[in-house]
Image (cartoon, helix red, strand yellow):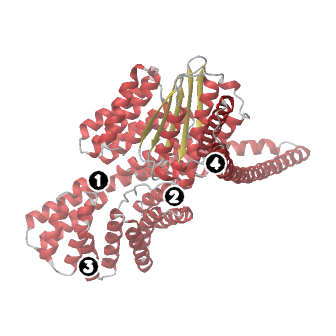
């Protein structure tokens, strides 16, 4: 997130360019600007203001038909509503995100929309619907080979099946998520995947295995300094000790968690206090048990899902009954029974729906069977020759179908292998290109520049003479040598941008665009989000992408103004490059041209996508989306802590 001062500067720059850039260009920047303001308002606790700015960004994105801005708005606004526990409102926005993603064919945001809808249904305790949408998201992630989202969606499915008490499936999907996180070498993701695996093992009564995994989880949390993950590990380990009747160990573990509560997100304290109350009750320490219960129940209704809240009310009824506070005990018992009846009702409703679906399927199968019987009776009237022909035809069709399926599978495997080889070859070619750039830059600097310097020194040693013509020739020669040396340094720095390694991607792009600007072309840059977390290889390729696009503007666009904008989030990097030049026919673009080919190759190397739109005499817009995966240090996600 940019600082308040940086945000103010960016706002002033945008205001300054209002009279310069076309309206579409100004409005697309304003969409991101409104989203950024909403995010900062939410972080400052100004929820109502954040809601207003989110809605304004979505309205503007719709008006100017800015699809990428609209997807950014729906994704961020859905997350905001989820954090505010406004699940039904969040569902409406997530469904808009899904509809737009399908409309423009953006598979990544389509999968994220399915996942968001599933998460909201999960929060509403509609587990069957949640599982349905998680599966849709997972299918897209597997089809697009998106390992990062495959890990997340498997973990979400594990949570659903655990809540549905199908612990075998819960354990299966949790293990899938953990294995993918291990493959990605994403330590934080490994920790989050372990959470569901531990819960599934607990309910399968594999307590020792769950304890060992909890120790591993705590080690990961300490290594990554993730307080939320650390608390999750302590809470689950405390629960495991309680189930093993090691009540003192449970209290010691949860006491460690209590020390970390001030640094954690709200909600963890409720589960820590619930665990401590349970452990003290089991030891017969009713005074401390009541103390921790009161701290737990104070905000349990705002934090816990109904299944967990029900257990808190049951604990309260038992503690108050033990303390002879029968009126309070009765009140908590009624709350427990009410929630229990509600959950049973929801479960029964889902079961009835499932039974009804199975019934309708059975009726259709019976009708189909009846039709098949009629056809069979009619077929029996035909002579044996026709029967033989019919059977032979069916066998042939079956074999052809098997052959076709085998051919398609083989073709897909061949295509996948070919694509992998092409990606490896492309990576090798680009790496070779960078090495050659660096070698050439070094030779220009060390050899040619040195030679020019030596020539200049040699000319300076020439004895002074009164020959005016010789002196003038000497001065012209020195001027030419100075110009050549400057050009060599410029080429060398352009081929090997040391500023990228020394000052980071933002400064490198700003410096390049500043140098590329001239009296005929003004290039303006905007940056949203933190680019310092990108690793060096990603940063270099992204720099080359921007460099290639800007060079194309300089060479071909005949533009007077251009914009380079980078927007970094925890999931992706959006690059927008626009100009007001002469434009071109996008349908007639020659993708085998060196400039556009280099641009597309680098985007493909980062598993990214791009859109190029252009109108004759109105300019060109290039939008590039790059999934970041594990190439950045992202904030870890909060894991749900089942009871």
* Residue at the image point whose x is 49% and y is 35% from the top: 514
Q: In this view, does 213 lie to the left or right of 331?
A: right
Foreground mark, 2 or 1? 2
Question: Residue under circle 4?
Answer: 605
**Residue 342: which numbered mark, if any?**
1
Q: Is residue 610 left or right of residue 390?
A: left
SS at circle 3? helix
Q: How far apart are marks 3 and 2 (CA)?
A: 33 Å
Pointer 3 residue: 252
SS label for mark 1? helix
Q: Mark 2 points at which residue?
A: 151
Between 266 and 347, the residue placed more toward the observer is 266
Q: Which residue is drawn at 44% across and 66% down?
A: 191
Q: How crowded is mark 4: few (under 14 residues within 10 Å), some or many (20 or more)?
A: some
* Mark toward the viewer: 2 or 4: 4
Tell me which numbered mark, 1 or 4, is placed earlier along the sequence.
1
Mark 2 surroundings: few (<14), some (14-19) or many (≥20) residues within 10 A: many
Residue 79, how many percent across, how many down?
37, 45
Q: How far apart are marks 2 and 1 (CA)?
A: 33 Å
Point out residue 433 in the picture as x, y percentages from the top left corner: 69, 49
Q: Is residue 149 above or below residue 207?
A: above
Label 1 vs label 3, nearer the camera: 3
| Marked residue nearer the N-terminal end (3 or 2) | 2
Q: Who's the residue at 37% across and 70% down the image?
A: 222
């Amino acid at each position: 997130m940019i600082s308040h001062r940086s945000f103010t500067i960016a706002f002033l720059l945008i205001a300054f360019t209002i009279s310069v850039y076309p309206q579409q260009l100004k409005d697309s920047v304003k969409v991101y600007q409104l989203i950024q303001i909403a995010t900062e308002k939410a972080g400052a606790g100004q929820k109502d203001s954040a809601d207003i700015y989110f809605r304004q960004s979505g309205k503007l994105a719709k008006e100017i038909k800015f699809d990428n801005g609209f997807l950014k708005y729906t994704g961020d606004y859905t997350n905001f509503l989820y954090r505010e526990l406004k699940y039904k409102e969040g569902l409406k926005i997530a469904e808009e995100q899904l509809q737009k993603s399908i409309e423009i064919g953006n598979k990544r945001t389509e999968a994220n929309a399915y996942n968001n809808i599933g998460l909201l249904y999960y929060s509403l305790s509609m587990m069957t619907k949640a599982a349905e949408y998680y599966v849709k998201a997972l299918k897209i992630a597997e089809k697009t080979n998106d390992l990062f989202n495959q890990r997340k969606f498997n973990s979400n499915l594990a949570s659903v099946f655990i809540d549905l008490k199908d612990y075998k499936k819960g354990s299966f999907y949790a293990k899938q998520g953990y294995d993918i996180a291990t493959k990605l070498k994403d330590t934080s993701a490994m920790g989050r995947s372990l959470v569901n695996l531990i819960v599934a093992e607990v309910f399968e009564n594999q307590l020792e295995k769950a304890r060992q995994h909890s120790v591993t989880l705590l080690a990961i949390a300490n290594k990554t300094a993730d307080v939320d993950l650390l608390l999750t590990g302590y809470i689950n380990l405390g629960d495991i000790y309680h189930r093993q009747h090691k009540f003192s160990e449970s209290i010691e573990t949860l006491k460690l968690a209590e020390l970390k509560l001030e640094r954690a997100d709200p909600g963890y304290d409720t589960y820590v206090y619930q665990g401590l109350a349970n452990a003290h009750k089991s030891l017969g320490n009713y005074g401390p048990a009541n103390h921790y219960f009161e701290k737990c129940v104070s905000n349990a209704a705002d934090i816990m899902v109904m299944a967990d809240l029900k257990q808190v009310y049951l604990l309260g009824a038992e503690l108050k009954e033990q303390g002879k506070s029968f009126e309070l005990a009765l009140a908590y018992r009624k709350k427990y029974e009410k929630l229990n009846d509600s959950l049973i009702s929801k479960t029964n409703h889902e079961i009835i729906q499932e039974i009804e679906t199975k019934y309708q399927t059975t009726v259709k199968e019976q009708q189909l069977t009846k039709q098949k019987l009629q056809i069979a009776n009619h077929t029996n009237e035909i002579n044996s020759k026709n029967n033989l022909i019919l059977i032979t035809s069916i066998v042939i069709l079956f074999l052809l179908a098997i052959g076709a399926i085998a051919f398609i599978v083989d073709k897909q495997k061949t295509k996948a292998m070919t694509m992998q080889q092409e990606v490896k070859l492309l990576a090798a070619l680009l790496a070779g290109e960078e090495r050659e750039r660096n070698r050439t830059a070094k030779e220009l600097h060390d050899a040619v520049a040195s030679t020019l310097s030596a020539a200049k020194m040699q000319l300076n040693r020439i004895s002074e003479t009164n020959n005016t013509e010789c002196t003038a020739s000497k001065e012209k020669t020195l001027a030419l040598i100075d110009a050549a040396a400057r050009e060599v340094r410029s080429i060398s720095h352009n081929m090997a941008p040391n500023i990228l390694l020394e000052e980071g991607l933002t400064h490198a792009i700003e410096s390049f665009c500043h140098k590329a600007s001239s009296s005929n072309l003004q290039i303006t840059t905007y940056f949203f989000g933190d680019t310092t977390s990108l690793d060096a290889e990603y940063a270099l390729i992204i720099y080359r992408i921007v460099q290639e696009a800007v060079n194309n503007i300089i060479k071909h666009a005949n533009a007077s103004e251009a914009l380079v904008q980078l927007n970094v989030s925890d999931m992706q990097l959006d690059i927008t490059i626009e100009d007001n030049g002469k434009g071109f026919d996008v349908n007639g673009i020659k993708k085998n041209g060196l400039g556009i080919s280099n641009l597309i190759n680098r985007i493909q190397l980062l598993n990214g996508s791009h859109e190029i739109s252009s109108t004759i005499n109105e300019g060109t817009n290039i939008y590039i989306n790059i999934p970041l995966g594990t190439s950045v240090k992202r904030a870890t996600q909060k894991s749900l802590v089942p009871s």
